[in-house]
Image (tube, grey):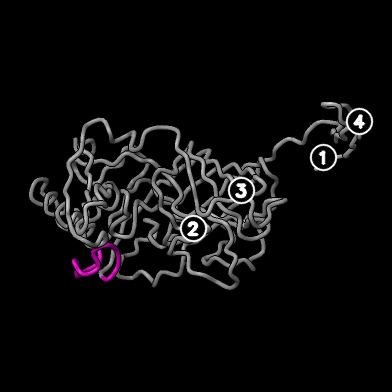
Amino acid sequence: MWSKTAIVLFARSVAGKQVTTRQPIGPKPAMAHHDLDTSTLHQTWDNAIEPRLRIRSGDTVTFQTMDASNGFYDPALGRAVDDAPPFAGHPLTGPVWIEGAEVGDTLEVEVVEILTGDWGYTAFSPGRGLLPDDFDTPHLHRWDLRSDPAEFLPGISIPQEPFLGVMGVGLAESGPHNTAPPRRNGGNVDIKQLTAGATLWLPILVDGALFSCGDGHAAQGDGEVCITAIETPTTSTLRFTLHKGGAPAELQFRIPGPINARTNAAGWFATTAHGPDLHASSQMAIRYMIEHLVQNHGLRPEDAYILCSVVVDLRISEIVDAPNWIVSAFLPNAIFT
């Protein structure tokens, strides 16, 4: 739509045919910037939630987002992992209504900037994560994110590459839905490559798109194996562009440069595991990596597990030579000083 719209209809000849062209008079409206704070959050996907903001294609929005614990592990509060309440869903900022968005359209989201908070945490509890039965007690590590790289332990520091673990549109299905599993709408995809400069495309499943985001991470390994990364509040700026039709079946994305740019310079150490089950082989590859970190770097097993979650990348190295597939776990040498 054009402000003070004036449409001039005029005819011109193209290839011998008369065609009618609509041409706007007056300047195209400037793309707007908006801000959304954390005063109202939602912790389920539910297309009945009223939009907090309405924007146009081309607008940018700066989202304030809470960490996955919704502030429970804020260091100022001094809370312990034993006191954590049951997970109630990711606290999400939104929804945002995009004018003109209809089912079957495509929402392009450009990640303009992501700034972390001053603090973060990584935690796990028995019964959760890739190794639910390997640890009998919960464990919590707090991070000071005011320096980059962020120190884990003496001699080990993790470069910050912040991204939003949850970015998604409203689901077509009515009612509340858990935010934990990723879905066709995107959601809790935890794709570490969606840092500043990345662009993703989402299928629009409800009119208005109803985009929400949250679950900021300062760093993460591919797999997020202990079930948390370096969880942190963020200030995240995204640009939205609506494309009519052409919705992808599921999320697609593009990144502007090399994967793992900040940890790729000093080489890698990898463990591997084979078998007919990719999930079981992923478990074994991480167990072997934990053994390596304990035996060769002097870490406690629980610290090794946390380190795997924030920096070790799981990869499918081979999936065609039945009956066994190969999963590899890659540890960057650059984190050791």
Q: Residue at x 88, y 39 (%)?
A: 4
Q: Residue at x 32, y 34 (%)?
A: 262
Disc 3 vs disc 2: which is toward the camera? 3
Residue count near mark 4 (Cα–Cα under 10 Å), binned few <14, some 14–19, many ≥20: few
Q: CA distance from mark 2 to mark 1?
A: 33 Å
Q: Earlier in the sequence, mark 2 or mark 4?
A: 4
Decide: marks 1, 3 in contact (CB < 8 A)? no
- In the rendered image, residue 204, in percent from the top left (x then y), is placed at 61, 55
Decide: marks 2, 4 in contact (CB < 8 A)? no
Q: CA distance from mark 2 to mark 4?
A: 47 Å
Q: How many marks?
A: 4
Disc 4 vs disc 1: which is toward the camera? 4
For label 1, the residue is: 2
For label 2, the residue is: 187
Check disc 3 and report its element: helix, strand or loop. loop
Magenta-tinted stretch:
127-139
Q: Considering depth in this image, is 33 or 199 the residue closer to the camera?
A: 199
Q: Earlier in the sequence, mark 1 or mark 3?
A: 1
**Quadrant location of the N terminus in the rendered image:** top right
- In the rendered image, residue 283, in percent from the top left (x then y), is placed at 22, 60
Q: CA distance from mark 1 to mark 3?
A: 25 Å
Q: Earlier in the sequence, mark 3 or mark 2?
A: 2
Residue count near mark 2 (Cα–Cα under 10 Å), binned few <14, some 14–19, many ≥20: many
The residue under label 3 is which amino acid type? Gly
Disc 1 vs disc 3: which is toward the camera? 3
For label 3, the residue is: 246
Q: CA distance from mark 3 to mark 2?
A: 20 Å
The residue under label 1 is which amino acid type? Trp
Q: Residue furthest left?
A: 295
For label 4, the residue is: 11
The residue under label 4 is which amino acid type? Ala
Check disc 4 and report its element: helix, strand or loop. strand
